[in-house]
Image: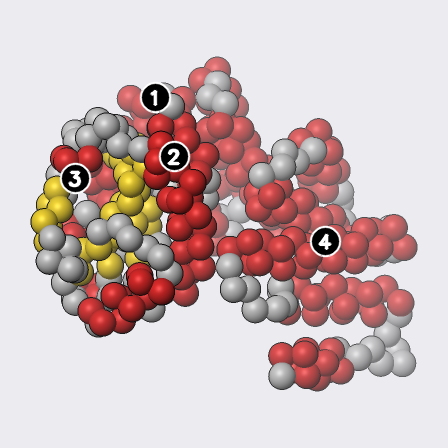
Amino acid sequence: MKHLIACLLLLAVTVSADDTPADALWQKLQFLERQGPTGEAKSREEQITNTVAFLNEAEKLCDQFIRDFPTDKRVWEAKSDRLEISLARSGITDQQPDLAAIEASVKEILAAEDASKPVKSQVSLLALHLHAKQLIESPQPAKLAAFDQEYSDFTTNYPANPATRQLPFLRLDVYEKNDPAKAAALLKELTSDKNPAFAMEAKRRLQAQEIKSKPLQLKFTTVDGKEFDLANLRGKVVLVDFWATWCGPCRMEIPNVVATYKKLHEKGFEIVGISLDQKKERLLEFTKANDMPWPQYFDGKGWGNEISGNFGITGIPSMWLVDKKGFVRNTAARANLETEITKLLAE
């Protein structure tokens, strides 16, 4: 059925007699980007494979447009799209992008007189995120002034870009790695921001910092009636997994979580689940069917779950890693789970 729908959509973008070859290729690229990755993913690995295949195909079309129609004004948008594709793929595959080529392309687009303001806005944003990522991964306090100038230039030149509203938190992330004292001041300012969403996010981050400041306290009666106390797992690395059986992304993560548990459990790795399910039977059936032997908290309240509510969890899956001393070391462990666990086990 999905293939039939795709074919029907493709017919809807069939070129007319008045369309040029450039128009035809551009429509094909636009259709592909609207369609996105195809195929139903049953695991995170399949999702990655489908997404990379989509990005590769989109990149081929961008390259073809850039090669065949270098004087078409849309070539700058194609080059901007190609930059996004390159960075997105490197993020998914954990491969280092060609930074020199990216910087050169950004400069070329920004210098182009016939490149539109939206296109320049987008590549400027890409560059800002790239430089922020570099400063977060390899802190260099000496480069903060240059980053702040780039940040200021972007917010001044492109105030209409929706991303501008989220950039204070990107800047905060940079300062947390390069100047913690200044980051604390920035975060405190954001808790009083006139934007309620900003203020709420800032308060959530403050709460997360407080959680990390002392050993995590977590006691409850498990879904099967046993008493659980995280303090009894001192000396172990523990994943606290906030999830639910009704959550699609959570279910997609389960094979990876189970595989990691089986691989590292004997080395001192444990898991505790905080389930936001409302049906106990469903939870028990799912954990048994998917070979999940670790303790689960369940109170049947869904998003009203008391433990997740107390910890400010607003989205799932949410994965926290607790070190051997009981301190929360990572509140976003989903992306590189096995790597992060291995690092903590080695401490």
Q: Secondary structure at mark 3?
A: helix
Q: Which label's residue is closer to the chain start, 1 or 3?
A: 3
Residue for badge 3: 230
Q: Which label's residue is closer to the chain start, 3 or 2?
A: 3
Mark 3 or mark 4: which is in front?
3
Where residue 341 is drawn, which disc sits there?
Answer: 2
Q: Secondary structure at mark 1?
A: loop
Where residue 347 is drawn, which disc sits there?
Answer: 1
Check the image and name the residue furthest to the top.
Answer: 142
Left or right, 73 with reference to 129: right
Q: Which label's residue is closer to the chain start, 2 or 4?
A: 4
Which residue is rendered at x = 22% and y = 55% of the image? 296
Q: Secondary structure at mark 2?
A: helix
Name the kind of residue labelled 4 in the image.
Asn
Q: Secondary structure at mark 4?
A: helix
Distance between the alpha carbons at the discs numbered 1 and 3: 19 Å
Q: Which label's residue is closer to the chain start, 3 or 4?
A: 4
User: Residue 262, percent across and down?
Assistant: 40, 44
Distance between the alpha carbons at the discs numbered 3 and 2: 17 Å
Name the kind of residue labelled 3 in the image.
Leu
Name the kind of residue labelled 1 in the image.
Glu
The relative height of residue 259 versus residue 103 in the rendered view (above or below) is below
Residue for badge 4: 56
Mark 1 or mark 4: which is in front?
1
Q: Residues within 10 Å of mark 3 (few under 14, many from 20)?
A: some
Give the quarter of the figure containing the N terminus: bottom right
Distance between the alpha carbons at the discs numbered 2 and 4: 31 Å
Q: Which label's residue is closer to the chain start, 2 or 1?
A: 2
